[in-house]
Amino acid sequence: MLNMPKHILLITLSCLALWACTGERSPVDAVDTPSELGAGVATSNAEITEPVIVYSSRQEYLIKPLFDRFTEETGIEVQYQTGEEGPLIARLQAEGEATFADVLYTVDAGNLWSAANRGLLASVESSVLKQNIPAHLREPKGQWFGLSVRARTIVYAKDRVNPDELSTYAALADPQWRGRLCLRTSKEVYNISLVATMIERLGEERTQAIVEGWVENLAAPVFSSDTLVIEAIAAGQCDVGLVNSYYLGRKQVDDPDYPVALFWANQESSGTHVNISGAGVTRYAKNPRGAQLLIEWLSTEEPQMMFSEMNLEFPANPAVSPAEQVATWGAFTQDNINVEAAGRLQAMAVMLMDRADYR
């Protein structure tokens, strides 16, 4: 964990009282000295002596093994502060030039877009990240990069639903599913991001009609978590739902015969909605080269596999195979809309869901 000496904290608080955000930050320079790190990482750590400091909304058990492995390979220490994404982004903004953070590492493209939109992230020029991370999983100006992929798709009761009946997110609004659908609350960012990308692809009017159909088809009031949606299907409270795939994976690890299965939505059209966990170099990073090196390393084979094994997510790097449990779900086509739409259209999505009475 990040521990700040008292004299540094006092200096920081004094700086915050005077700080005002002005000017533009130049892109972090690409560094092209060869190294022996993960395949394709092109940044030398020879002159990096300071720790890389990360603000992260990811849980400690998911990031500490990665940071420890990075330190083993490079000799560069990683210090980190964890917390909820909203307060972390607000803290980064309040600290301004006085921030300790070199990297912001969080879940959901909407959160990364919000940080970038507030001017909190620097643009990075990196041939490594352009090679390892597909264009739709990174910010076009290099302000943030997806590091793992989570698919939000359909799950169903194996004993009550024939998968041949399933097709698209939109089809879940059909009368066939009246009283059979379970959803997580609209206040959850994963659902906001799904609706935002639907707006980008289908338009606001069509998306609202779909969401209104979902609400009409609900079998129960919305749930507070994806896990509860899955458990409601297993218990017979509903027959279908929308969840991030790794939540079902956790159930299947504990019980390979779990009575709920996964279906890849929109495979005959736009592809399944995906979102990311990802990271960017902060605008006022004190160690921008170390920060870039860390993000580049996280895009390479070993850490990508670690992501997949620890949280049953998909590697963002398409050259890396997913963990065994994840692979059992089969290959699928991702929606290739840039995930930045999840942030850019977030406010519109929230208002749309409110109009549709999706709570």
Image: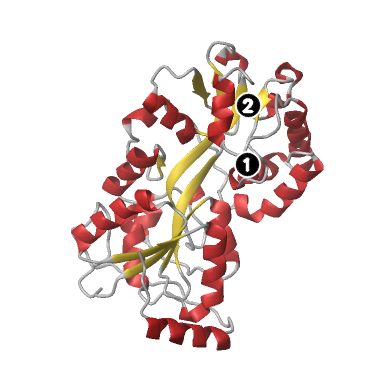
Q: Nearer the viewer, residue 240 or 339?
A: 240
In the rendered image of this protein, does residue 86 appear above or below residue 350?
below
| Left or right of residue 128: residue 124 | right
For image coordinates 31% across by 63% down, the residue present is: 293
Task: Indicate the secondary structure of the residue bearing disc 1.
Answer: helix
- Quadrant into which the N terminus falls: bottom left
In the rendered image of this protein, does residue 238 appear above or below residue 184?
above
- Asked if residue 6 shows in the view, the reply is yes
Q: Quadrant of residue 231?
A: top right
Q: How many marks?
A: 2
Mark 2 or mark 1: which comes first in sequence? 2
Q: Quadrant of residue 21?
A: bottom right
Q: Nearer the viewer, residue 89 or 162?
A: 89
Local crowd size for mark 2, using a 10 Å CA cut-off: few (<14), some (14–19), many (≥20): many
In the rendered image of this protein, does residue 311 appear above or below residue 67?
above
In the rendered image of this protein, does residue 4 appear above or below residue 88?
below
For image coordinates 70% across by 24% down, the residue present is: 219
Query: What amino acid does circle 1 point to?
Result: Asn
Query: What amino acid does circle 2 point to?
Result: Thr
Q: Nearer the viewer, residue 316 or 51?
A: 51
| Left or right of residue 189: residue 256 | left
Q: Where is residue 125 shown, x and y percent of the image?
A: 41, 65
Which residue is label 2 attached to? 168
| Left or right of residue 215: residue 14 | left
Which residue is label 1 attached to? 191
